[in-house]
């Protein structure tokens, strides 16, 4: 059963990744960029620094994702009191994409609810996992 669960989770991950890429293709965002941008948008009105994201994500992942999002979605502003700190400033393009990002994440969540029982070998409401 454990092997079946691991296989099911891997298949689910691949399916969601593929579905997310299709939904976000027009905005040229990866699923990871979408999730990070959604998080940043949810903290609207708060000062957000790159270091704030390091508590839960690897530095390389944060750096590469922020670098990609600098292509119109955000900019980095140096902190005058601390050279090592950079504040994340969302740009108009990020706010313009907010509804599409939200819709995309909801669609992925709905797909997740539909696929888990099917991948586990049962139908909706199945306890096959």
Image (cartoon, rainbow, N blue to C red):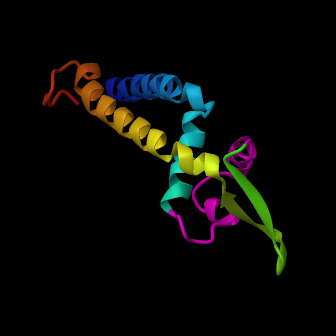
Task: Give the left or right position of residue 93, taking residue 10 as reference.
Answer: right
Tell me: residue 1, above or below residue 63.
above
Image position, residue 21 (x, y; %)? 53, 26
Dividing the image into 4 quarters, which one contains the C terminus?
A: top left
Q: Quadrant of residue 121?
A: top left
Task: Give the left or right position of residue 11, taking residue 72 as reference.
Answer: left
Tell me: residue 43, above or below residue 22.
below
Dividing the image into 4 quarters, which one contains the N terminus?
A: top left
Image position, residue 81 (x, y; %)? 82, 81
Q: Quadrant of residue 65?
A: top right
The answer to which of 126 and 106 lies nearer the viewer is 106
Image position, residue 80 (x, y; %)? 84, 77
Q: Which residues are magenta?
A: 43-71
Image position, residue 103 (x, y; %)? 39, 39
| Residue found at the far right of this picture | 83
Tell me: residue 41, above or below residue 96.
below
Task: Give the left or right position of residue 100, taking residue 53 as reference.
Answer: left
Number of marks present in the image shown: 0
Task: Give the left or right position of residue 23, taking residue 83 as reference.
Answer: left
The answer to which of 129 and 68 lies nearer the viewer is 68
Whether the magenta-drawn stretch holds residue 2 is answered as no
Tell me: residue 81, above or below residue 35.
below
Name the residue rendered at 69%, 61% in the picture: 88
Whether the magenta-drawn stretch holds residue 60 is answered as yes
The answer to which of 43 and 60 lies nearer the viewer is 43
Name the residue rendered at 48%, 29% in the picture: 20
């Amino acid at each position: 059963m454990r092997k079946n669960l691991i296989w099911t989770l891997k298949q689910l991950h691949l399916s969601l990744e593929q579905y997310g890429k299709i939904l976000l293709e027009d905005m040229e965002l990866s699923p990871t960029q979408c999730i990070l941008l959604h998080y940043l948008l949810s903290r609207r009105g708060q000062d957000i620094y790159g270091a704030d994201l390091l508590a839960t994500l690897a530095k390389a992942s944060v750096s590469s994702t922020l670098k990609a999002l600098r292509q119109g979605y955000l900019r980095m502003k140096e902190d005058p009191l601390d050279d090592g700190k950079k504040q994340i400033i969302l740009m108009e393009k990020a706010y313009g994409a907010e509804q599409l990002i939200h819709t995309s994440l909801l669609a992925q969540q709905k797909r997740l609810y539909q696929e888990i029982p099917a991948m586990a070998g049962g139908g909706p409401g199945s306890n096959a996992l």
